[in-house]
RNA sequence: GCCGGGGUGGGGUAGUGGUCAUCCUGCGGGACUGUGGAUCCCGCGAGCCGGGUUCGAAUCCCGGCCCCGGCCCCA
């Protein structure tokens, strides 16, 4: 069907785009205020880049294709890997830490459902050069700051530490470790017990952990972790410790965090991040950490909390109506002046004035400029549609009129 | 890939086998010669696709596609 959308994709109406840009602009502003700088990478990469990191199974969940000369390519399924690729190939000799951010669309071949699309948007940051608790604290504070400024209320920050789990499992190979981590995330503890793991007691103590920072000291003495929690407490960021976070975080290696909206359904994670190691992928060690918001879900969550009502362009709107097409040239001239200050359209459908008025009112236009015979004397009519008053002014006085609005 | 619920003009809807295509809204125009969302009138515009049952299918059956939600998964 020529006019249907591809499954899992969306069109965005003018109203939706207004909300979208509003949210995006706030994110962008906060990111920049923290000193992050924007980057953009290609929409597609060599398949190999992602194969190295995630293995063959990603092909099933990605848009993979060959171009005309047989290159094996992939539409980016996430942006951290391309960002690091960019860093390695072009940004390495910049002063560290590097603070980078991006707002990009990504693609995954999954069954669409609430909050999950095949083309979706990520707004994320990466800190390259360190994975110190100070850096992670900055990330979480930053993410929290964005949500606060957007006015989101019903969310929960959960912090875990994959290093603790991986330490206990360090005697096993990586493949087996990942299998165990997956079971931990799914809370399939019975199955877990059937493996009779060497440090089973210790492991269960960790994944069943419930409590706050002070209780944590009883089961581990990870200094970085404690430092981070101290920083967050000092910054009054509310969080929950959840040491069983393990899902889908293959490249994460240390502290991780997730933010969930309590107002969303099955797909309720609106943010995820942590300390990762992509170093092996490129042949040397890179200390880095980062996070990304799922923009689509963030929008959904904000919508559920009624935070996107009455978002609009505050700029006043003008419409120029001409009684005869011979005044069109004058209309362009006048529009040029108005547009220095406000939004201005010209009536181009040769409507009758009555219909033009209806159009203006329906589109919430503030002022109607009417060009009739008076224009021969350089006089125009300006009708204030909101207050229903009308006056004649000379073109020479138009600019003053606009300045005083 | 699996499960459940759906698919009728641009948006929202009515009809459960029989002349079928309803109503609201939208859009374009007219009544109205240069001024307000009104009113009246005219016009535009639809049963997801393919197959089957039937004299006859929007309606019943099968398959596919897509949407909504859930599972798996979420790098």
Image (cartoon, rainbow, N blue to C red):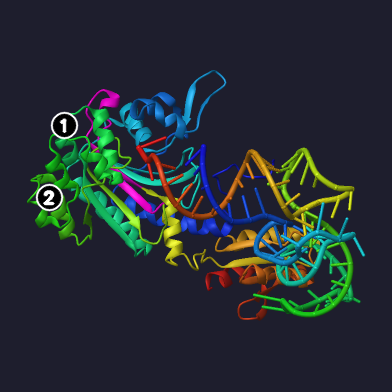
Q: Which residue is mark 2?
A: A227
At horizontal 25% and vertical 36% (from top left) the residue drawn is A180
Circles 2 and 1, Cβ within 8 Å, touching? The answer is no
**Quadrant of the image for the N terminus of chain A?**
top right
Residue B19 pos. (x, y %): 90, 59
Mark 2 or mark 1, whichever is nearer to me:
1
At horizontal 32% and vertical 44% (from top left) the residue drawn is A125
Image-quadrant location for residue A81: top left
Q: Is there one chain holding both mark 2 and mark 1? A: yes
At horizontal 23% and vertical 36% (from top left) the residue drawn is A95
Relative to B53, A391 lies left or right: left
Which residue reaches farthest top? A69
Residue A170 pos. (x, y %): 16, 31
What is the distance, in whole Å, between disc 2 and disc 1 at their CAs?
24 Å
Tell me, yes or no, whether the highlighted magenta stretch contains residue A273: yes
Sequence order check, earlier mark of 2 and 1: 1
Height in image: A133 above or below A323? above
Q: Nearer the viewer, residue B21 or A224?
A: B21
Height in image: A361 above or below A263? below
Q: Nearer the viewer, residue B57 or A313?
A: B57
At horizontal 53% and vertical 70% (from top left) the residue drawn is A403
Q: Which residues are magenta?
A: A267-292
Mark 2 crowd level (few <14, some 14–19, many ≥20, 10 Å Cα) = some
Q: Which mark is residue A170?
A: 1
Answer yes or no: is residue A245 visible: yes
Answer yes or no: is residue A98 visible: no
Residue A22 pos. (x, y %): 46, 58
Mark 1 crowd level (few <14, some 14–19, many ≥20, 10 Å Cα) = few
Q: Nearer the viewer, residue A121 or B68?
A: B68
């Amino acid at each position: 069907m020529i006019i249907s959308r591809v499954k899992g994709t969306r069109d965005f109406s003018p109203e939706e785009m207004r909300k979208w840009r509003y949210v995006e602009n706030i994110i962008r502003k906060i990111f920049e205020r923290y000193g992050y700088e924007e980057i953009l990478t290609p929409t597609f990469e060599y398949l190999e880049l992602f194969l190295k990191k995630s293995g063959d199974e990603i092909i099933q969940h990605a848009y993979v294709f060959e171009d005309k000369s047989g290159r094996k390519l992939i539409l980016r399924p996430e942006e951290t890997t391309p960002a690091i690729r960019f860093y390695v190939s072009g940004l390495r000799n910049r002063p560290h830490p590097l603070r980078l951010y991006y707002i990009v669309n990504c693609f995954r071949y999954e069954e669409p459902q609430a909050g999950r699309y095949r083309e979706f948007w990520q707004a994320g940051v990466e800190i390259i050069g360190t994975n110190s608790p100070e850096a992670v604290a900055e990330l979480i504070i930053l993410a929290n700051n964005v949500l606060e400024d957007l006015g989101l209320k019903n969310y929960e920050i959960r912090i875990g530490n994959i290093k603790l789990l991986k330490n206990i499992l360090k005697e096993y190979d990586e493949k087996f470790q990942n299998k165990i981590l997956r079971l931990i995330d799914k809370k399939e503890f019975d199955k877990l017990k059937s493996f009779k793991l060497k440090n089973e007691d210790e492991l269960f103590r960790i994944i069943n952990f419930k409590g706050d920072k002070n209780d944590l000291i009883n089961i581990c003495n990870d200094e970085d972790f404690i430092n981070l929690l101290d920083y967050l407490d000092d910054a009054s960021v509310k969080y929950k410790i959840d040491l069983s976070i393990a899902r889908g975080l293959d490249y994460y290696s240390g502290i991780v965090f997730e933010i969930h909206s309590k107002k969303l359904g099955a797909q309720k994670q609106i943010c995820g991040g942590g300390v990762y190691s992509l170093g092996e992928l490129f042949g040397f060690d890179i200390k880095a950490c980062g996070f990304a918001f799922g923009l689509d879900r963030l929008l959904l969550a904000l919508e559920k909390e009624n935070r996107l009502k009455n978002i609009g362009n505050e700029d006043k709107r003008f419409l120029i109506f001409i009684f005869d097409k011979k005044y069109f040239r004058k209309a362009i001239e006048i529009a040029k002046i108005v547009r220095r200050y406000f939004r201005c359209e010209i009536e181009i459908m040769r409507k009758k004035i009555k219909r033009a008025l209806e159009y203006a009112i329906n589109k919430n236009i503030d002022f109607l400029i009417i060009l009739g015979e008076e224009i021969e004397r350089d006089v125009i009519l300006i009708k204030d549609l909101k207050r229903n008053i009308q006056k004649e002014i000379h073109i020479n006085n138009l600019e003053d009129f606009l300045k005083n609005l």
